[in-house]
Image (cartoon, rainbow, N blue to C red):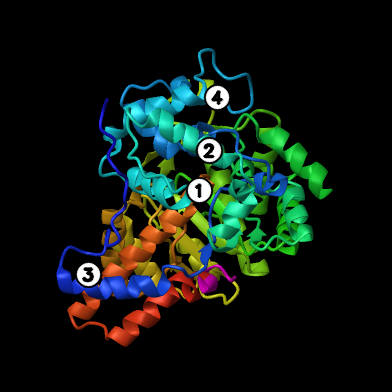
Amino acid sequence: MARLTRMSPHPDRLLSPEPGVRERARELYQAVAQAPIISPHGHVNARMLADDEPFSDPAALLITPDHYVTRLLHGSGVPLEALGVGASGKSPPPSGAAAPRAVWRTLAENWRRFAGTPVRYWFEDTLARVFGLEAELGPASAERLYDQLAEQLARPEFRPRALLERFGVEVLATTDDPADGLEAHARLAAEGLGVRVIPTLRADAYMDPADAGWAGRLDALAEVSGVDCGSYPGLLDALRARREYFRALGATATDTGVLDAWATPLSDGQAAAIHRRALAGEVSGEEALAYRRNMLYQLGLMGAQDGLVMQLHVGVLRNHHRPTHERFGPDTGHDIPVATEFARPLRELLNAVGTSPAFRLVLFTVDETAFSREIAPLAGFYPSVYVGAPWWFLDAPAAVRRFRAAVTETAGFYKTSGFVDDTRALCSIPARHDMSRRLDARYLAELVSDHQLSEDEARVLARALVDEIPRGAFRL
């Protein structure tokens, strides 16, 4: 029988191998380790929290919906259907989709492939600290761990709401379509959940008139807003109305995910003409691009009017592999980063509203060269611009440390966003925030050791990074 090794995350993980730095980092970390979690950007489903049903099985909770997990397995030759990935609700799951226990076994058999990745860090932290499991994941322990997880998931204390409260989450922002009625948020507010769950409006689907589903989405938006979206002015009015509705249910921010950051205005006549041609099925690719860039500009102007913080997530080429997208849908692991620029693309928008007290823009990138080259200098001048935390492909420990070194000398700490977990995986939230707190404690300890900060100032900053800074950046 194979020997089972114990899974025991080291108490000093990520706190530096240098003894003096590690001692200071340990003190700073311990001061904030149990601080409430503020999660101003994420993708947990509000309906899941409102319904509060037990999770069905370990694979459906921890593997199948998490593209961080499935993409690396797919890159190692594991078919997505072997991981339970379905067809995005548009059709039945592909034939041959694996049963939950088989999905879990597949992960266990390939666990060595995650060595050194943040996925492994979060996963082991989750298994150990959330579920109290001790055996290290692998082929020999797979069945035992699956049974232990399945037994726990049947208990009331492992339902979504109980977990969220146990994690110490104080604020959780979701990501929602403007046409969403937000019934789940209204239910959560009415039922007095101990966690503040707020919506975030994401209007990406209404920006590109070349997209096949664009006209249908306009119809859905018109129905929920009561504003005819058959014209360009009507679409803008409908979005303004939905922004107000989201604010009434607690929203403090919007989110926009686009390939590039160009925010270039069109005249009302130009935009209206493209809108009409798109509804007639006659829009060109060049016109659609101009319309989308104009819409980004218009959303910025709306932010300067209503005060909703504008998050801009830029530089990901979505659905890179067309056959996978057609069979399995979006968010299935084949979104790929591309080089990104900010200074020139955002110049017109920032010239218009960059010094407006009401405007707030948080810039996220997966091109880490942009942090020191463009984003931090923009945040260092414009009162409205904040540096978004390392996102997606950059949320690994080494990349987070590079981020602090890249932006602090130009923008400081108080013009950053605070950590965002950006996750659909509810159970990984505490692991991700804990990782950030450890890495920030280490960076602050290094500054103290270099005599760039006093110990007292480092303590103040450690607390601010998990509380004052994210509250301020996202107007919470």
Task: Count residues near mark 1 (Cα–Cα under 10 Å), then give few for <14, some for 14-19, many for 20+.
Answer: many
Estimate the x, y position of residue 402 in percent, counting from the top left: 26, 60
Q: Mark 4 points at which residue?
A: 86
Q: What residue type is labelled 2?
A: Leu
* Dots 1, 2 in contact, CB < 8 A: yes
Q: Is residue 371 left or right of residue 429?
A: left
Q: Is residue 288 magenta?
A: no
User: Which callout, 3 or 2, points at the residue further toward the start of the chain?
Assistant: 3
Q: Mark 1 points at which residue?
A: 427
Estimate the x, y position of residue 366 in percent, counting from the top left: 37, 50
At horizontal 54% and vertical 61% (from top left) the residue drawn is 40
Q: Name the residue under label 3.
A: 22
Q: Gap between marks 2 and 4, in whole Å? A: 14 Å
142 or 106: nearer the viewer: 142
Under circle 2, the secondary element is helix
Q: Gap between marks 1 and 4, in whole Å? A: 21 Å
Q: Is residue 475 magenta?
A: yes
345 or 62: nearer the viewer: 62
Q: Is residue 123 left or right of residue 43?
A: left
Q: Gap between marks 4 and 3, in whole Å? A: 45 Å
- Looking at the rendered structure, which numbered label has been put on residue 61? 2
At horizontal 58% and vertical 20% (from top left) the residue drawn is 93
